Image (cartoon, rainbow, N blue to C red):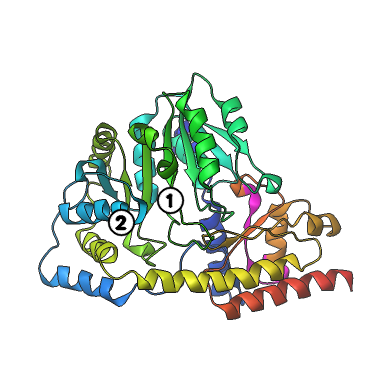
């Protein structure tokens, strides 16, 4: 017999980034030479001092369950990190540690949303935001921000989208997939709108905070709008900055009563995060930070090559990024001239078949006509990728 799946799950799409990466792995297993630029994962190894801390925790027998919101040691390290890096003050009861920043956000949505309450999501967006909102019973409201606005929403857009049913705004800066960052004046303009709507909370997804190279220092929303602290949750983690994706440690900081509710959600799902991973994350936040700067420098080097190489391809337009490790070019001109390709989804399949390059369709991020390319890979792979894209396109006009 077939099992009837819940309506809530039936409306959810599989993650496009995971789907593309799995298809690339399947082709590789079948003997195809594939370059995968689909997955958002640093290609560097976790720094040695962090691995040493994990080994020491194992040797010391720190292998038991941890408190639901995280070990006191790690939460204190997170408090220090916010003070040192962001100028924000929290106490450990305002911190929750989860199995990745994704769970931190999911905990927030489940703790906050009632049925059909609205969450404003600027597009392009990280692929999981809308479906996570739906799983929590809410309704995603998408605000489109194209290249003409530097892929960022304006205060006027935000104002016009707010209703009595709006519960949350999600801001991701630096953005996945665009690499764009909201500056101080943009934060203040959004903050002025939000001040007039006290029922609306804000989730700042800052997971790419340290992969950032714009001239002005990184600023999260609360740096420019401190009066919003009582209804803002800042979400971060160690996965991107410290190349610790598999360690699965994310965290959130916010109002104490809301963090307590998030802990209640986590207590009935996964409970506390891995004790060994928390020891490693503590070493990452408290230890030397030069490894972060070194990785960021290499990402910037790759960015400078890839953005300009893409922009030189006929039919491709690619804006520069402020951070993260993605290029998000428009391939609209390419789609127009390929007779058997109607959209970015078909184009991604076309490149996988004809060039052996895996990229994620922009439609998955709410931006049709674009493709996302991760440059969390070697320069050799990036140069090979560009050469393959060029050859495949040239062969169609030969």
Q: Residue at x 14, y 62 (%)?
A: 63
Q: Quadrant of the N terminus?
A: top left
Which corner quadrant of the image does residue 292 belong to? bottom left
Q: Which mark is residue 206?
A: 1
Of tags 1 and 2, the one toward the viewer is 2
Kindly give the residue lying farthest to the bottom in the view shown: 380
Q: Nearer the viewer, residue 116 or 164?
A: 164
The answer to whether 368 is drawn above or below residue 309 in the figure is: above
Q: Residues within 10 Å of mark 1 (few under 14, many from 20)?
A: many
Is 357 a magenta residue?
yes
Q: Which residues are magenta?
A: 352-363
Left or right: where 169 falls relative to 237: right
Kindly give the residue lying farthest to the right in the view shown: 398
Q: Nearer the viewer, residue 379 or 10?
A: 379
Kindly give the residue lying farthest to the top in the view shown: 164
Q: Secondary structure at mark 2?
A: helix
Q: Residue at x 46, y 23 (%)?
A: 197
The answer, for residue 53, to whether it is visible in the render is yes
Q: Nearer the viewer, residue 189 or 321?
A: 189
Left or right: where 212 falls relative to 362: left
Is 146 a magenta residue?
no
Q: Residue at x 80, y 69 (%)?
A: 393
Mark before the other along the chain sequence, 1 or 2: 2
Left or right: where 78 falls relative to 188: left
The answer, for residue 31, to whether it is visible in the render is no
Q: Residues within 10 Å of mark 2 (few under 14, many from 20)?
A: few
The answer to whether 384 is drawn above or below residue 169 in the figure is: below
Which residue is denoted by mark 2 in the rendering?
84
Q: Which mark is residue 357?
A: none
Q: Secondary structure at mark 1?
A: loop
Which corner quadrant of the image does residue 5 belong to? top left
């Amino acid at each position: 017999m077939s099992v009837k799946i819940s309506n809530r799950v039936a409306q959810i799409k599989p993650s496009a980034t995971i789907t593309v990466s799995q298809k690339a792995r399947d082709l590789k297993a079948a003997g195809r030479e594939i370059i995968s630029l689909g997955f958002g994962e640093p290609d560097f190894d976790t720094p040695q001092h962090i691995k040493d801390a994990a080994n020491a925790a194992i040797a010391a027998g720190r292998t038991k369950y941890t408190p639901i919101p995280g070990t006191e040691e790690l939460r204190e390290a997170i408090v220090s990190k916010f003070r040192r890096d962001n100028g924000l003050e929290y106490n450990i009861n305002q911190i929750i540690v989860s199995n990745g920043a994704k769970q931190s956000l999911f905990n927030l949505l489940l703790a906050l949303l009632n049925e059909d309450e609205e969450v404003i999501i600027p597009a392009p967006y990280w692929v999981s935001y809308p479906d996570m909102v739906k799983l929590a019973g809410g309704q995603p409201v998408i605000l489109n921000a194209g290249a003409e606005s530097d892929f960022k929403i304006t205060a006027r857009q935000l104002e016009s989208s707010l209703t009595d049913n709006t519960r949350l705004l999600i801001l991701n800066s630096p953005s996945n997939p665009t690499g764009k960052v909201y500056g101080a004046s943009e934060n203040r303009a959004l903050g002025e709108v939000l001040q007039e709507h006290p029922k609306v909370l804000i989730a700042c997804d800052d997971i790419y905070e340290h992969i950032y190279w714009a001239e002005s220092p990184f600023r999260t929303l609360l740096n420019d709008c401190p009066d919003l602290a009582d209804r803002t949750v800042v979400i971060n983690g160690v996965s991107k900055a410290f190349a610790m994706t598999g360690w699965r440690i994310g965290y959130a900081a916010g109002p104490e009563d809301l963090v307590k509710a998030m802990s209640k959600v986590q207590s009935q799902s996964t409970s506390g995060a891995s004790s060994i991973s928390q020891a490693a994350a503590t070493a990452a936040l408290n230890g030397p930070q030069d490894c972060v700067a070194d990785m960021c420098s290499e990402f910037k080097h790759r960015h400078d090559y890839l953005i300009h190489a893409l922009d030189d391809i006929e039919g491709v337009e690619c804006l520069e990024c402020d951070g993260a490790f993605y290029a998000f070019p428009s391939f609209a001109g390419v789609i127009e001239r390929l007779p058997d390709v109607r959209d970015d989804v078909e184009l991604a399949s076309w490149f996988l078949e004809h060039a052996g390059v895996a990229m994620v369709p922009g439609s998955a991020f709410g931006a049709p006509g674009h493709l996302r390319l991760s440059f969390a890979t070697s320069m050799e792979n990036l140069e090979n990728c560009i050469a393959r894209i060029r050859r495949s396109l040239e062969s169609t006009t030969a």
